[in-house]
Image (cartoon, helix red, strand yellow):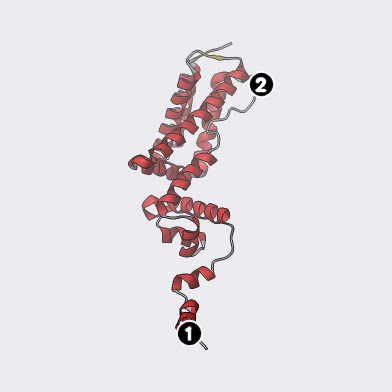
Amino acid sequence: MTTPYDAVRRRTTPIDAERSTVPRIPAAERRAALVDAALRVVSREGIAAATTRAIVAEAGMSLASFHYAFASRDELVDELIATVVAREQQAVVPTPEPGRSLRELLESGIIAYFEHLKSDPDHEQAMLELTQYALRSPERHPLAAAQYARYAELARNSLELAAELTGARWRTPVAEVARVLVAFTDGLTITWLVDRDDAGALAVARAAADALSRMADLP
């Protein structure tokens, strides 16, 4: 005999039906896939276009999948910013080349960064947009601060390695030199994204290497 209670237990909602079709993907993998999809949307269309629906469409998932992984779009954007920072590779890495001067190593490192920028300008533009997004939200400002602290750390490591390879010694505290290097690469990035002037960017690389090398005592 079927009771009203049995009927209620068997009744499913559209959300229940959708959830029943969600593939059994581990939560960590689902979160990572959604973060990657969000980065692609932001790179291609900007942060304003990175709606929940746009992100799940990019990831090939359902809205139910999104809500299994994140409580809100804001939570996903927070993780996206943190992920971009965590993935950031060394922007200016001197290549060990015997016989090269400090200035030459610095210039080659900045040019290597520029080549990286040219290879994926949409990604770099997305990173800038995420920084601005974080700065507009007081609760997310620490994420922008963490992003630039990471850049400074990478720059400092590269400068210390360059000095070690050439026998130079930084006369100015290396943390200050790193800040200058980050400012140069930021300026190069934004200017090139606007004008796509390769020769102009290479001129910036030369000027940056000149200025930075003057902050060191050379052997």
Does the rendering let one see residue 192?
Answer: no
Q: In this figure, which residue is indicated by the disc labeled 2?
A: 98
**Total numbered labels placed on residues in the image:** 2
Pointer 1 or 2: first along the chain: 1
Q: Is residue 5 visible?
A: yes
Q: In this view, does 209 lie to the left or right of 45?
A: right
The residue under the point 52% across, 32% down is 111
Q: Is mark 1 on a helix, strand or loop?
A: loop
Looking at the image, which residue is at 43% across and 33% down?
A: 186
Q: Position of residue 132 (x, y in %)?
A: 37, 41
Is there CB contact under 8 Å for labels 1 and 2? no
Residue type, label 1: Thr
Q: Residue 96 falls in which quadrant of the image?
A: top right
User: Residue at label 1?
Assistant: 3
- The three-letter amino acid code for the residue at tag 2 is Pro
For this rendering, which residue is in front, 18 or 105? 18
- Asked if 57 appears above or below 124 in the picture, the reply is below
| Residue 140 numbered tag | none
C-alpha distance separating marks 1 and 2:
85 Å
| Quarter in which the C terminus is drawn | top right
| Residue 101, percent from left and from top | 58, 18
Q: Residues within 10 Å of mark 2 (few under 14, many from 20)?
A: few
In the rendered image, which quarter is residue 176 located in? top left
